[in-house]
Amino acid sequence: MEKILRDKKAIVLFIAPAFIVFTLILLIPVVQVVYYSLCSYDGLMKPTLIGFKNYKDLLLKDETMRIALKNSIFFMLFSAISQQLIGFVLAVLLTNIKKGRNFFKNVYYLPCVLSSAALGLLWAFMFNPKMGLNQILGVFGIEGPLWLVESSGLIPLPMWVIAFVALWQYVGQTMMLYMAQITGLSTELYEAAYIDGASKAQAMRYITLPLSKPMLKTTLSLNCIGSLKFFDLVYNMTQGGPNHRTDVLATHLYQQGFKFFKYGYASAISVVLMILCLIVTVVIDKSIKIDNYEV
């Protein structure tokens, strides 16, 4: 093994396939997108270099971009906080029960494997003002709100609805990741804690929580990045309406690129989105310190 590690040709041979795939699938498209973001490009004519005009228009003139950025940040914060809390609590509860564990795991995780497009259409039907949930409320004499049409408020009601639907769909994923972390912890730690008189709540606070930090960093990164680039539920439930009030960065990018054929402008939005994802990743990595414990 040491001989192979000293052989530079062998190192290049092993690294080359992954490097080629990385270059073709990630590096080259990223460079192209950055270049197109500096151009006026409609997908038909050759790109015309215009400098940072797209970014200036995006940040200074585009009101929809400000709404989309606000909604994406709200969606990220809501998803990160709610999914971390609920996912961790569910993981702890399911880890400590014996009967019905697999059943409840499947129930909570099932929405994750279903098509987001299909779920978006399903929930759009459920929140239709004239049917679905409002029809059920009408039986009890309650007039339901305009779930996906209301546009007032800093964060309009449709964004809250979409955020709760996304929580319902993806909390099972966070739960499963935390369960994998918790079940991998040594039972001897808990046995020693219980012998010393610790309660289950204290064991969770002083053993489970600190030793779950590696998974916290992973799940938080997945939640935040996934929320920033979220598209399918928003598009299928509201298509960014009413009046762009539920637009997020991904839907605004889609509309500019595939509806108005402003590929240069859409590329600028994608670069902003990529930078946001990188910033969030770095902040999470620097904020969550993982201690090494000898167990």
Image: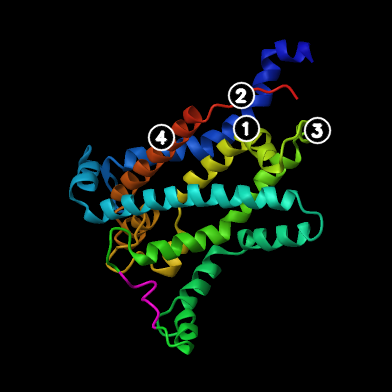
Closer to the camera: disc 4 or disc 2?
2
**Gap in angstroms between the C-alphas marked 4 and 2:** 23 Å
Q: Position of residue 240 (x, y in %)?
A: 35, 64
Neighbourhood count class around disc 4 (C-alpha, 10 Å): few under 14, some 14–19, many 20 upward:
few
Instruction: Indicate which disc residue 195 carries.
Output: 3
Neighbourhood count class around disc 1 (C-alpha, 10 Å): few under 14, some 14–19, many 20 upward:
some
Label 1, secondary structure: give it: helix
Closer to the camera: disc 1 or disc 2?
1
Q: Residue at x 38, y 51 (%)?
A: 74
Compared with residue 269, is residue 106 higher up or lower down, i.e. above or below?
Answer: below
Amino acid found under the numbered disc labelled 4: Ile
Tell me which numbered mark, 4 or 1, is placed earlier along the sequence: 1
Instruction: Indicate which disc residue 291 carries.
Output: 2
Q: Position of residue 278 (x, y in %)?
A: 43, 35
Label 3, secondary structure: give it: helix
Q: Main secondary structure of the magenta part?
A: loop
Amino acid found under the numbered disc labelled 2: Asp
**Gap in angstroms between the C-alphas marked 4 and 3:** 44 Å
The image quadrant where one finds the N terminus is top right
Amino acid found under the numbered disc labelled 3: Ile
Tell me which numbered mark, 3 or 1, is placed earlier along the sequence: 3
Q: Position of residue 125 (x, y in %)?
A: 48, 78
Q: Camera-side residue: 175 or 260?
A: 175
